[in-house]
Image (spheres, grey):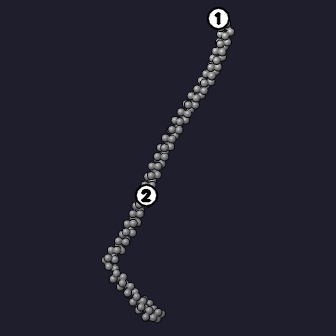
Amino acid sequence: MGGLLVAGFLMKTVGWRVIVVTGAIYSCLYLYERLTWTNKAKEKTFKKQYVSHATRKLKMIVDLTSANCSHQVQQELSGTFARLCHLVDEATGEMDKTLKELEVEVMSLENAASRAKVLRNKANYLTHELELFENAYLKGQH
């Protein structure tokens, strides 16, 4: 009953020719779609949908794999960095220890050199005194 009322209202408002032309165009489009919707077209549409679906899934897999690889690389780099920091700390500690030992040895050698210089000066003085003594007392008696 409602359809008849709408149809009657449209006939009065638009006219029967517009309704027939619109119905004919719609029928032609429907017939065209119905005739072109063959098994080949269905297969082509299915393949497009499948490729789209597979592409989305593969992108998700690539993103997930990439994130996992990135995380693993980050962990490896962090571990390697920590080990290298530990090795550097050990090497620095050993170098500091060696440096302190060398500083002590240098101080000892400087002290020995200073004492040796004093002793050499004393020896030179005594040698000179002996030469003076020899020249004054021993050479004169021959």
Query: Is 77 situated left or right of 114 in this image?
Result: left
Mark 1 or 2: the one toward you = 1
Percent position of residue 58, x then y: 39, 63
The amino acid marked with disc number 2 is Ser
Residue labelled with disc 1: 142
Q: Quadrant of the C terminus?
A: top right
Mark 1 vs mark 2: which is more N-terminal?
A: 2
Percent position of residue 111, x then y: 61, 25
The amino acid marked with disc number 1 is His
Vertical placement of 12 versus 91: above or below? Answer: below
Residues at marks 1 and 2, CA–CA distance in whole angstroms: 106 Å
Image quadrant where residue 103 sits:
top right
| Residue occupying the far left of the picture | 39
**Residue nearest the viewer, comparing 26 with 16:** 26
Vertical placement of 89 versus 36: above or below? Answer: above
Circles 1 and 2, Cβ within 8 Å, touching? The answer is: no
Percent position of residue 102, x then y: 56, 31
**Residue nearest the viewer, comparing 126 with 26:** 126
Residue labelled with disc 2: 66
Residue at the image position 35 percent from the left and 85 percent from the top: 31
Give residue 129's mark: none
Image quadrant where residue 121 sits:
top right
Q: Residues within 10 Å of mark 2 (few under 14, many from 20)?
A: few
| Residue occupying the far top of the picture | 141
Whether residue 5 is visible here, answered yes or no, is no
Q: Residues within 10 Å of mark 1 (few under 14, many from 20)?
A: few
Residue at the image position 34 percent from the left and 77 percent from the top: 41
Vertical placement of 112 versus 73: above or below? Answer: above
Image quadrant where residue 141 sits:
top right
